[in-house]
Image (tube, rainbow, N blue to C red):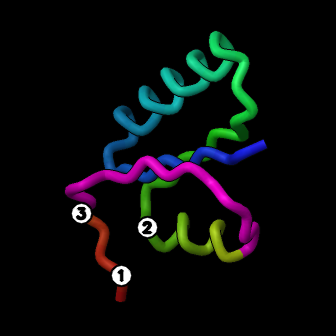
Amino acid sequence: MIPLYICDDEPDLCKRIAGLAQKQILILDCDIGPVRTFMRADALLAAHDREAVPAIYLLDVDLQDHLD
C-alpha cells in the first residue's frame, strides 16, 4: 500500500480532503492508504523520516507553518 499524506494548516479543509480521498480510494479500489493528515510541516517530516517509504503527498501551497 502507498500511504497518502495530507498537510494543511486549516483543520476543516484537511479533514474534508482526507474524507474525499478515502471515498475515492474505496470507489476506485486503489492500493493507497492509510490516509494520514498533518497540520504542521514538521510533523509530516517526522512521520516521513520514521516510515521512509514512497508516498503520495498533498501539500498546502500557502502553509502558514514555519520551520525553525
Q: Residue at position x 72%, y 17% from top?
A: 29
How crowded pointer 1 is (Cα within 10 Å; few <14, some 14-19, many 20+) is rated as: few
Q: Secondary structure at mark 2?
A: helix
* Residue beneath the point at 72% across and 40% down: 34
The answer to whether residue 44 is left or right of residue 60 is: right
Inspect the magenta stretch and tell me whether residue 53 lies in it.
yes
Q: Which residue is mark 2?
A: 41
Give the magenta-colored segment's residue range.
Answer: 50-63
Quote the CA–CA distance across marks 3 and 2.
Answer: 9 Å
Circles 3, 2 touching at the beta carbon (< 8 Å): no
Which residue position holds label 1?
67
> In which quadrant of the rendered view does residue 44 lie?
bottom right
Against 23, residue 54 (above or below) is: below
Question: Which residue sits at x=31%, y=52%?
Answer: 60
Residue 64, which numbered label?
3
Q: Position of residue 36 (x, y in %)?
A: 61, 46
Q: Amino acid at mark 1?
A: Leu
Q: Quadrant of residue 67?
A: bottom left
Q: Position of residue 56 (x, y in %)?
A: 56, 49
Q: Tag 3, which secondary structure? A: loop
Vertical side of 23 occupied by 8: above or below: below
Three-letter amino acid code at disc 3?
Gln
